[in-house]
Image: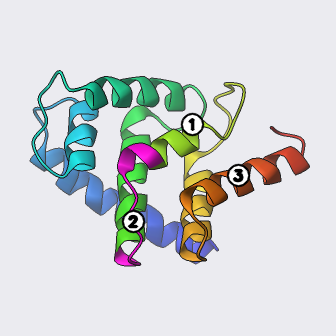
Amino acid sequence: MLKHATLFALFIIVLQCAFNTTYASESLEYQLATLNAGTFVPKDHITVARFRSLLSQLSSTYVENKEQIGDMSYTSQQLLRKEGIEEKLLNVMEGMNQLFSTRDESWEYLEYISAYVTLRKKGRSHSEAIRGLQALLRAVGVY
């Protein structure tokens, strides 16, 4: 498990360098909206506002900052894509936002996004993976 976490962290660092170089002059939420669409989107597109909101909500739930959350989400989407699993970036982040009913800033995004990717690789659909994580959190008294 530690080996996978280390490789995942290294992949995030490499990706972050490339990600920041390519879109350095654009806001993070715009970068994510563009990646989500796979093409140009207007700066006032509804998904730009939704990513802005999600980044704010997620960074108030998890210990990682907005940039780390964006990078980890994108990296997770790319890891899934390499396995032949297509999932919109917006969907991934919406799912991670549904895991907790309260905001705490004490949970690690890396832990939950990694579990999500693992469940998806094992054949679970997006909604099954999110429900599975929610059930696990309820079972341990977190949710």
Based on the picture, tell me whether residue 85 belongs to the magenta stretch.
yes
**100 vs 71, nearest the viewer:** 100
Q: Would you say residue 41 is visible in this rendering?
A: yes
**36 vs 67, nearest the viewer:** 36
First to last magenta residue range: 82-91
- Whether residues under marks 3 and 1 lie with C-beta atoms below 8 angstroms apart, the answer is no
Q: Mark 1 points at which residue?
A: 97
Point out the frontmost of discs 3 and 2: 3
Task: Give the image location of residue 55, x and y in percent.
Answer: 42, 30
In the rendered view of the protein, which quadrant contains the C terminus? top right
| Residue 5 sits in quarter | bottom right
Q: Earlier in the sequence, mark 3 or mark 1?
A: 1
| Residue 141 sits in quarter | top right
Q: State the separation of the CA atoms marked 2 and 1.
A: 24 Å
Q: Name the residue under label 3.
A: 131
Q: What residue type is labelled 2?
A: Leu
Q: Which amino acid does label 3 sit on?
A: Arg
Element at badge 1?
Answer: helix
Task: Give the image location of residue 70, x and y in percent.
Answer: 37, 43
Q: Mark 2 points at which residue?
A: 10
Q: State the separation of the CA atoms marked 3 and 2.
A: 29 Å
Task: Give the image location of residue 54, x and y in percent.
Answer: 45, 30
Report the number of discs: 3
Point out the frontmost of discs 2 and 1: 1
In this rendering, the answer to whether 140 lies above or below 6 is above
